[in-house]
Image (tube, helix red, strand yellow):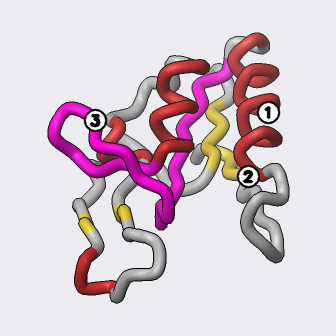
């Protein structure tokens, strides 16, 4: 079973994405397989016809994480909007929640 690491903070803009980028880069450098998910994105961008969190797109572009972008950003919510305006996508079985670390067998 893969090991999981959940990066959290008590507020927004506390460095979770920056910390995650550093952890992902270090783990990839060690040859580990890494996944990423931003469960609820509050700052989304449109990318290839999908609303995805900008941090998930950044992780994909910078680190090349092998996971579908829609799985990395399953919920995109407009800031200061009711939940009814959110976009929710089911994730595929291939991508696990949080930062997933798979050690080589």
Apparent side of residue 16 relative to residue 79 in the rendered image (left or right): right
Q: What residue did someone put label 2 on?
A: 5
Label 2 or label 1, whichever lies nearer to me, is 1
Apparent side of residue 68 relative to residue 60 in the rendered image (left or right): left
Check contact, mark 2 vs mark 1: CB within 8 A: yes
Whichever of labels 3 and 2 marks the residue nearer the N terminus, that label is 2
| Residue extending furthest toward the front | 80
**Mark 2 crowdedness (10 Å alpha carbons): few <14, some 14-19, many ≥20:** some
Q: Residue at x 59, y 20 (%)?
A: 63
Whichever of labels 2 and 1 marks the residue nearer the N terminus, that label is 2
Say which element carries label 1.
helix
Q: What residue did someone put label 1 on?
A: 23
* In the foreground, 26 or 83: 83
**Mark 1 crowdedness (10 Å alpha carbons): few <14, some 14-19, many ≥20:** some
Check contact, mark 1 vs mark 3: CB within 8 A: no
Decide: is 66 above or below 92.
above
**Magenta segment boundaries in residue numbering:** 32-53
- Between the residue at mark 1 and the residue at mark 3, the CA separation in whole angstroms equals 25 Å
Whichever of labels 1 and 3 marks the residue nearer the N terminus, that label is 1
Check contact, mark 3 vs mark 2: CB within 8 A: no
Q: Is residue 39 magenta?
A: yes
Q: What residue did someone put label 3 on?
A: 47
Give coordinates of residue 40: x percent, y percent.
47, 66
**Mark 3 crowdedness (10 Å alpha carbons): few <14, some 14-19, many ≥20:** few
- Between the residue at mark 2 and the residue at mark 1, the CA separation in whole angstroms equals 10 Å
Q: Is residue 50 magenta?
A: yes
């Amino acid at each position: 079973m893969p090991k999981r690491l959940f990066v959290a903070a008590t507020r927004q803009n506390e460095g979770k994405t920056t910390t995650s980028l550093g952890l992902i880069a270090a783990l990839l450098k060690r040859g580990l397989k890494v996944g990423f998910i931003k469960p609820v994105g509050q700052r989304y961008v449109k990318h290839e016809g999908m609303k995805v969190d900008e941090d998930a797109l950044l992780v994909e572009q910078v680190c090349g994480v092998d996971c579908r972008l829609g799985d990395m950003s399953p919920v995109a919510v407009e800031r200061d909007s009711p939940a009814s305006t959110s976009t929710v996508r089911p994730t595929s079985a291939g991508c696990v929640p949080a930062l997933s670390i798979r050690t080589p067998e």
